[in-house]
Amino acid sequence: MLRLLIACVAGASVLHVVDGYLLHKSIAASEVPHSITARAGDVRILFFGASLDRNAVMGWCHGRGNHGTEPVEAAWCSDEDNKTFVGFLFHPGVGFNGDCKHPIAMPLGYATGRILRRFARKTAFLMLEGEPDIVVVDSSLWDLYAWRRATTKNVTRVKEVTEERVRQWCQHDLPSLLKKVSIVFPESRIIFRTAPTIERTPNLEKFKKDDIELLYQCISSSTSEGKLFGEYEVIDYHAIMQRLIDRNVPGLFRADGYHPDWYPSALYMSEVLRRAGLHQEDPPGPVLENGRTVDRRAEFEAAIQGDPNDIALF
């Protein structure tokens, strides 16, 4: 089934998804809204990552007039009162070899390098109506999945994630990805997001908790005075989730065991908005209020409208 992903200003489709894979329709340079410039006081945030970011965006967009036609690969909305534009664009990580090229976990999809070269900037302008102030980048779970299960010439191999492979990611792959993003968005603050720890994964061909911890150790050891590789800010989703686990906060994960539920997702979004200079208070957690447990899961589920076990939402 063909699913419309993004509609450009002129009404022509830019991206489509067929069976979970990205297809691209070229846009003439004249179609990019170069005349759009950020107005004073506007805030524009682009999430360039995976479904953890998409869910945070969709949760925030709920009730704000989401403009994503089907929130699987991209979504965006704006808050006119706060003059805030928020958008999400999917990418599949650095790939098996770490060069943002094939092979990737989705063998028929576009690799991250091609997404950046061909339409990331154009799509960001269409969603945000201007240059993003902040680009939040993730490259974790899809990387782990690609390393563990990469398909080349229709042959799938499952491998263990090694410390050597993580060192390559830390010393070469991730710095290269962040540099590529900064070239595409030279006026934006590039911020890296860590992967939150997980509860469980029914399909261990995707990744393991220990694998995520290896990546987190890499990020921690490469961060000094709040700057990853001495250059990029870090939003520590892993630490947000771990603090909640340590406090025994209930209902932190969705049914699959690795997607954060509504509360940690909302805390993550609040931290991003604060980094953008907005006054943002954390939402109340799932605790007793007036003798009953507050649970906003139904609202969150309605907002994200997706199957967390669908690989396209990874």
Image (cartoon, helix red, strand yellow):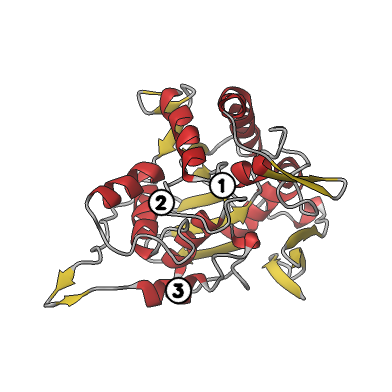
Residues tagged 3 and 2 counted as in contact (Cβ below 8 A): no
Can residue 129 be seen in the rendering of this structure?
no
State which tag comes first along the sequence, 3 or 1: 1
**For residue 207, which numbered disc appears in the image?**
1
The residue sitting at 73% across, 52% down in the picture is 106
**Amino acid type for the residue under numbered disc 3:** Glu
In-image side of 133 versus 289 (left or right) = right
Q: Which residue is mark 2?
A: 41
**Amino acid type for the residue under numbered disc 1:** Phe
The residue closer to the viewer here, 57 or 50, is 50
In-image side of 26 versus 239 (left or right) = right
Can residue 283 be seen in the rendering of this structure?
yes
Tell me the crowding category of disc 3: few under 14, some 14 to 19, or many 20 or more residues within 10 angstroms, Cα based.
some
State which tag comes first along the sequence, 3 or 2: 2
* Distance CA(mark 1)–CA(mark 2): 41 Å
| The furthest residue to the left | 290
Image quadrant containing the C terminus? bottom right
* Distance CA(mark 3)–CA(mark 1): 24 Å
Residue 82 percent across, percent down from the top left: 37, 61
Label 3's element? helix
